[in-house]
Image: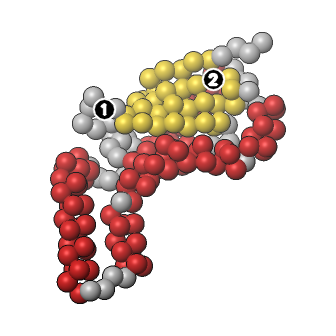
Amino acid sequence: IGCLGLNTALGPVRPYFLSLLCYLTASSAIANNQISISTLLLKFGIAFLPEMLYFWNIHGNKLLSRYNKKQRLDEKSTATISASMEFDIPTMGCVACINKIDSSLRNNKLVEKVSSSLDPNRPKGGTTKVSVKNSMSEEEFETLSRSLLEIMESAGFKGSSLSKLEINNNE
């Protein structure tokens, strides 16, 4: 269920913990005249995991799209985006929450694209934008939006709501 709000409390002191880790690692390596690269990589890999997840969340789709460019071009020719929805998620608090929401919504076969972000103006919460493929009626989009809200609720994000629904007529 995400970070359980720990990033709200521990987030501001994270830089101090990271600098302490770097100092202690360097000083112990100098004092012992030895350094194990695998131990060093493991320590820093775990310490910087949230930053690596954030980087993957921002740039991962671009990296994957370069890898699957031909497949995506074939899919774009057959599927058109007919609607987009925006959800307000007040309980989202960190990158792990964003990844949980995005991966949960991407499992729905009608979802074309998911993009979540934290709201910098609030201590906790954010929005998720979902683009939907296939042409449907307005009632079907509303049913799909309720289904996506249920998916988010089952992923542990209670209190989410649909804040915007845009239907594009591609006729």
User: Given the image, on which type of amino acid does mark 2 rest?
Assistant: Ala
First-in-chain label (1 vs 2): 2
Element class at badge 1: loop
Residue 156 visible somewhere in the drawing: no
Neighbour class for label 1 at 10 Å: few (<14), some, many (≥20)?
few
Query: Which residue is tagged 1?
Result: 120
- Left of 116 or right of it: where is 130? right
Residue 170 at x, y percent in the picture: 74, 15
Question: How many numbered marks are there?
Answer: 2
Query: Which residue is tagged 2?
Result: 83
Element class at badge 2: strand
Q: CA distance from mark 1 to mark 2?
A: 26 Å
Q: Residue at x 39, y 60 (%)?
A: 49
User: Given the image, on which type of amino acid does mark 1 rest?
Assistant: Pro
**Nearer the observer, 27 or 147:** 27
Q: Residue at x 64, y 31 (%)?
A: 132
- Left of 27 or right of it: where is 126? right
Residue 95 at x, y percent in the picture: 39, 48
- Left of 97 or right of it: where is 136? right
**Nearer the observer, 140 or 65:** 65
Neighbour class for label 2 at 10 Å: few (<14), some, many (≥20)?
many
Q: Give the answer, above or below, for where 146 lies relative to 24.
A: above
Q: Give the answer, above or below, for where 121 lies relative to 107.
A: above
Quadrant in the picture for residue 69: top right
